[in-house]
Image (cartoon, rainbow, N blue to C red):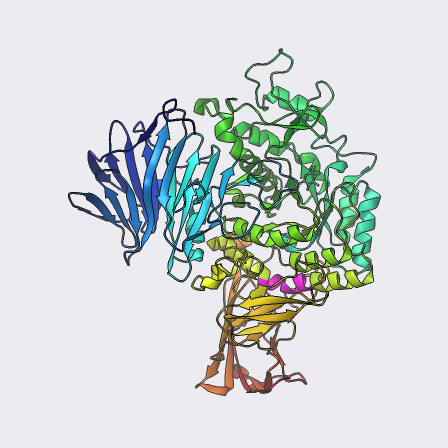
Amino acid sequence: MTSEEENALYRLGAVRKWQSEGPHLTFECDGTARLRLTVLTPGLVRVRVAPNGVFPPSSSWAVPVADETFGPPPFQITETDHTVTAQTGVLTLKVQRATSHLTILDRTGQILGDDAEGATWAENGQVSWSKRIPTNEHYYGFGERTGLLDKLGRHYSNWPVDKASHGPATNEMYQAIPFFLALRPGENSGYGLFFNNSYRTGFDMGYSKPGHYFFWAAGGFLDYYFIYGPTPAQIMEGYTSLTGRMKLPPRWALGYQQCRYSYTSEEQVREVVREFRSRNLPADVIVLDIDYMQGYRVFTWDKTQFPDPARLIGELAEEGFKVVTIVDPGVKYEPGDYPVYEAGLKADVFIRNPQPEDDTKPYLTGWVWPGECVFPDFARAEVRQWWGDQHNPLLEAGVAGIWNDMNEPALFAEGWKPLDFPLGTLVGDPAEGGTWAELHNLYALTENQATEAALRAVRPQARPFILSRAGFAGIQRWAAVWTGDNISTWEHLEMSIPMLCNLSLSGVAFCGTDIGGFIGNADGELFTRWMQMGVLYPFSRGHSAQGSERHEPYIFGPEVEGICRRYLELRYRLLPYLYTLFEEASRTGSPILRPLLFNFPDDPALTQLHDQFMLGEALLAAPVYAPGRQYRYVYLPAGVWYDFWTAKPLPAGQQHLLAPTPLDTMPLYVRGGTILPLGPVLQHTGQHDPAAPLTLAIFPDANGQASTLFYEDAGEGFAYERGELRRTAFDCLQVDNNPALWWVLANSKGEYATGRTRFVLKFPADYRVEEATLISEKRSLEVSEDGREVTVPVSDEMKACAVELKLVKTAIA
Ligand code: MIG
């Protein structure tokens, strides 16, 4: 900020009077300034300051739900000479009369958010808000961020940019999500803060002033949502109740996807598909990068290299492959010759140049792959409609999903110097008077909204799959996200864990990084380790840059190929579990991939742990991210744990163990108390067969109990929204505290007829089943020779069943 003289700074000052109306508690402060607290739910409070007394609109691009939709929850107001206090039942909101500063406390009186300088605003439009950092508070989320997990002491700004070859110290990335979680491990304290402002914003978490954090914006409103936890899961539920949740994707999008910049011809595409299938490397998708287009003109096909896209896509479908194509927002500026440009010109959809050089070029331009380009103004509804319609040549050919790249937007001046549009450029609905300063951050969000509408319109029965590089808070409503142009190095492999953890904690559950690394060349070892980790990314896609060596899993020789096959098979076996996690994320906003502290917020040892992650509640991965590693340390939190690969129990948790990590092994653990639903190995999700036996791998906790809530539906379409789904609670428990007598119970709800006819109960290595009976039919069940598997046939209509087991716990080597 400039000196105070040139740029006078203002604050709220003293409370003159206050009034409450519905969910709002409004304070009239010095001059025209007002402070408003809006209690949306007892744990969710919107806090706004209006310097001129006029508050921002009730909803925004990021938060489409209006305040009114929450319905006013009751809160009680008490006053003293010094304070005005609202009690919501969960939170205490205390405003100091002298300063209008706000302190938020939980039920036990613990201070959560505590204004230091509070809100300030400056002559030049900058706004900021500062609060105190309590001892032992740590910060997570912040969108797409490089570096380590915990962001205490860091500072960041939010402005999507094309940041190829980012490193640990990079600030702005492709995604801008002004949201964070504040957690105090072990102290049952946690909240989230969403700064509802689409201008360039920033967070300074004790970097400039130890003991204080502040958030600022270059313009716009002082408007944030305070989202009480205290658990990370509750915070994510609250945050996504505002900014929205991922919609349940089609099952095929959970399969492995293979990409390269680029597969440049039909023949190359066929060859890659042949290699995958002939080598039994499971995969669902092949991705076409920019070279499928004619001269990089968006929404065209290069008819020399791809003479008959519909036929090609049809052939690939027979092999169980879907096609996803890249789309760039820049439209080649090509008067006369390019129908997309001509149509856009006619419909007046491009971002206008406030000072055009001459009448023939009323639009702002920038250089991208096709040369000079113009850019649709996605903040206008009619432009989104127009853009959606342009997808027809792709969708008619049978393209299954869209990959929105370069949508920060990335553009260049002649000579490939990075460029941005002037901040004062008028964009969006003219009635709203929006400028590029306000709408730049929303460019990708609104583009993806257009893409999703187009996919829904053309294929009303298909769930859209969209992948986006840039985005803003709420991007999860429309698209999956990958972390852009990473590098084929061990450092980038390691960094992908905290990056995806923080992105996941920013509402983006469907996320991944380029497996193998995009820029540069992975060797076989790096590629192997990346594949081991990457099959657990929610979005699992291999990719590599133009000019790099090929990066398909069969390129590096038989050893690497064999290991990759085993891990791709692991992903496909995990699909029943993964799909359940996706459904949960779409309903509650829980991340799929998460840092351990998400599941164990009470364990202070996890505050900074960046090199392990959880997949849901049940799986803990400790990948290898350095060359030549024969062992790695693994931290297991409290509880009972099992080695996934051997199903052997491990020494009690809350300590480190040293895990052997030969090249073919990524340490993977299962938390005691869970039942892991596993499917058979598939080559692609088209082979999904609900009648195939579902393996229920049982991992008992210390009391001999385990459970899961397993989700199924058709994997495509929207019938699940009308109840065609099935949730089955599987519970395993000891009967009468008798360690030798167990029941496994299954109880289904929902209308989806699975046709499932068999379950296989599978026990850890230290158990032996001696006898198993299907209780309802008093029928004894088949037990495998090693005593660890019991096959349970169930009839189609059966929604509940119970199996009684007599088993012994054995000593194992
Ligand atoms: O680097 O379309 O991040 O995944 O392969 C140039 C070509 C533009 C950037 C994307 C990358 C993609 C590439 N694109």
Residue drawn at (47%, 38%) of the image: 202
**What is the chief secondary structure element of the magenta stretch?**
helix
In the rendered image, residue 688, in percent from the top left (x then y), is placed at 67, 61
Q: Which of 438 and 332 is in front in this view?
A: 438
Residue drawn at (42%, 43%) of the image: 194
In the rendered image, residue 709, in percent from the top left (x then y), is placed at 51, 66
Is 575 one of the magenta-colored residues? yes
In the rendered image, residue 659, in percent from the top left (x then y), is placed at 63, 70
Residue drawn at (51%, 38%) of the image: 158
Question: Is residue 50 left or right of 629 when viewed as pictured?
Answer: left
Question: Is residue 317 left or right of 7 when viewed as pictured?
Answer: right
Q: Quadrant of the N terminus?
A: top left
Q: Quadrant of residue 404?
A: top right
Q: Give the residue furthest to the top.
A: 358
Name above or below for residue 558 compared with residue 252. below
Name above or below for residue 648 compared with residue 713. below
Q: Give the range drawn in magenta.
A: 569-577
Q: In which quarter of the image is residue 692?
A: bottom right
On the question of residue 80 being in view, the answer is yes
Is 109 one of the magenta-colored residues? no
Q: In which quarter of the image is the C terminus?
A: bottom right
Question: Is residue 99 left or right of 40 when viewed as pictured?
Answer: left
In the rendered image, residue 333, in percent from the top left (x then y), is placed at 68, 22
Question: Is residue 636 left or right of 221 when viewed as pictured?
Answer: right
Q: Give the residue furthest to the left.
A: 81
Q: How many labels does the image show?
A: 0
